[in-house]
Amino acid sequence: MVNALFIVSGFVVFLPTATRGEFGSLGGYAIRRAARLLPAYYLILIVAWFITSYHTTTLSIGAHALGLQTLLYYLPDGSKPGFGVNGPVWTLTVEISFYLVLPIVAIAFYRRPRAGLLIAGMVALVWTQTVFHFDSLANFFGFGVSDELQGRLITGSANQLPFWVFSFALGMIGARMFTTLQETWSRETLNRWAPRLLIGATAGIVLFTFASNYTPLTDSLPSEFVGKASPLMQIGFSASLATAMVSLAFCSNRLQWLFANRGIRWLAEISYGVYLSHALILFSATFYWGLGFPTDFREFAVLAGFVVTVSVIYGYLTARFFEQPIRRYAQRFGARSS
């Protein structure tokens, strides 16, 4: 779930600021974030480029190299993130954008978290509703917008930072609440109230998920927009998800074990490589490796098992021998730069 990805990212990256009350060394931050995000990203891009190099353009290669690949959605030439074969890497453009913006707003958000959350919510709502109703606005000002252009605007804008800024802000305010509650409430009190809050937040997730299926024009929207065409859906679902995630952090160890046991932690350590590679492996298995499109459950199970297995192997190998050594070096180098 992309929403959860960005909420977690906002929480994790902002947590040091929420804990210390200061942002710290900009150089060390940049080195750590770049080491965490870029090596594995460029590696999978190289693999994808080799697969599709016969029909990629210089503009597409440049956009991917700069982390601006989601801007390709606005172009009429059909260029897409991941060179058209690894679509999920569009999220890296949003992550990079957030990492660039965070140093500018971190301290202000720390001092005024409620104002920061309100501003982020307004930005997300205005951005979403403007794009969703762009054709009506254009007609009001006397400009015609084709269905094809409107479709590209909706798809492209759903993959930009302003659309997801509220999710990042929820993660940031979650980090602020996490540190504040630990300082003001006892662990016993937190453990007693957290499960109740988790139940309420889970009910909210179910409610807003169910309601999103009845959003007008749902069938005509890209998946990123489903449930967000309505301002209530946009705010309610994200807020419920963030509340559930923060409350879970204060639940008992037994309940947390379901989400933080040894197997889950191992998968989390290799999850970045798994995420970056799974769509490319699915594409290759379907078009190049002879598995084809499944026509029944057995063929689907074979394809799914193959993709999951190869993705996990790829994630482990790249994490063990590529990502982790680079990140360890970056930690040492970043510490000297602090």
Image (cartoon, grey):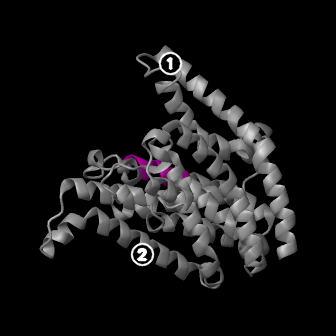
Residue with the mark numbered 1 = 290
Which amino acid lies under the numbered mark 2 shown in the image of this protein?
Met
* Residue 203 inside the magenta-drawn segment: yes
Please, is residue 129 above or below residue 103 in the view? above
Q: Main secondary structure of the magenta part?
A: helix
Disc marking residue 122: 2
Q: Is the C terminus in the top left, top right, bottom left or bottom right quadrant?
A: bottom right
Q: Nearer the viewer, residue 323 or 119?
A: 323
Which element is circle 1 on?
loop
Please, is residue 306 above or below residue 263 in the view? above
Q: Position of residue 304 (x, y in %)?
A: 55, 25
Which amino acid lies under the numbered mark 1 shown in the image of this protein?
Gly
Task: Identify the residue shown where x is 50% and y is 18%.
Answer: 290
**Region rendered in magenta:** 201-210
Q: Nearer the viewer, residue 87 or 46?
A: 46
| Between discs 2 and 1, the one toward the N terminus | 2
Disc marking residue 220: none
Q: Between tags 2 and 1, which lies in front?
A: 1
Q: What is the C-alpha distance between the residues marked 2 and 1? A: 48 Å
Neighbour tally class for label 1: few under 14, some 14-19, many 20 plus, Cα within 10 Å: few
Q: Quadrant of residue 257?
A: top right
